[in-house]
Image: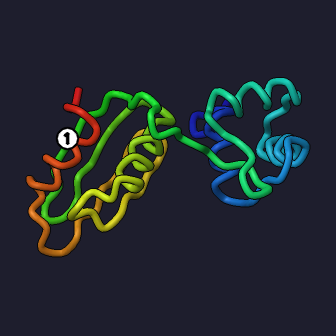
Amino acid sequence: MPKNKPTLDQAILMLIERQEVPDQATLIALLAQEGFRTSQGTVSRRLTRLSVQKRHGRYQRVVPENHPLPPYRLTLSPPNLLVLKTGPDFAMALAVRIDRTGVEGVAGTLAGLDTLLVITNPGADLEIVRGRIVELLGPPA
């Protein structure tokens, strides 16, 4: 397997993020185009494990409000960024929690697989925003 090839879970998440996937047959076909041969049973189990559900006619990752949050490390990157590092496939869970809560001073988030960028509003105090995020997510690991 090439070094840069995503895992099956990563491929599923990237596909449902990039385009509307209405059913498992479509997802299996798209995964085949990405080089993954898999069965409907495997896809179904992976979707459940990744908290992917069908919403509004397409698959989406749904992170429940009370879902336990993964451990993370937090680094300030002045003048307006905070960088959170977490385990593979968990950055989105942290981003969803921050976005849903509407942390004061946060302009938005950008999540990869294991890294989350938190962009602050112009003039926001990075340390104060950091404190609000730590209150929301718990202390960094």
Q: Residue at x 53, y 40 (%)?
A: 63
On screen, residue 63 versus residue 107, left or right, reads right
- Quadrant location, the C terminus: top left
Furthest residue to the bottom?
A: 122
The quadrant in which the N terminus is found is: top right
Q: Quadrant of residue 121?
A: bottom left
Q: Is residue 136 above or below residue 18?
A: above
Q: Residue 103 falls in which quadrant of the image?
A: bottom left
> Mark 1 falls on what kind of element?
helix
- Expressed as whole percent of the image width and height from the top left, the position of residue 30 reads 82, 48
Task: Tell me the residue at 41%/57% (across/down).
Answer: 110
Binning the other alpha carbons within 10 Å of mark 1 as few (below 14), some (14 to 19) or many (20 upward) gives few
When the figure is inspected, residue 85 is found, relative to residue 40, above or below; the finding is below
Q: Quadrant of residue 69?
A: top left
Judge left or right: residue 31 versus residue 76: right
**In the figure, is residue 108 to the left or right of 16?**
left
Residue at 71% across / 34% down in the picture?
Answer: 47
Vertical side of 22 occupied by 64: above or below: above
Q: Position of residue 14 (x, y in %)?
A: 63, 49
Residue 94 place in picture, x, y as percent: 39, 42
- Residue that protrudes farthest toward the front in the picture: 66
Q: How many marks?
A: 1
Q: What amino acid type is highlighted by mark number 1?
A: Glu
Colouring: rainbow
The residue wearing badge 1 is: 135
What residue is shown at x 48% (from left), y 42% (from top)? 113
Relative depth, front residue between 86 and 45: 45
Image-based side of 110 in relation to 49, left or right:
left
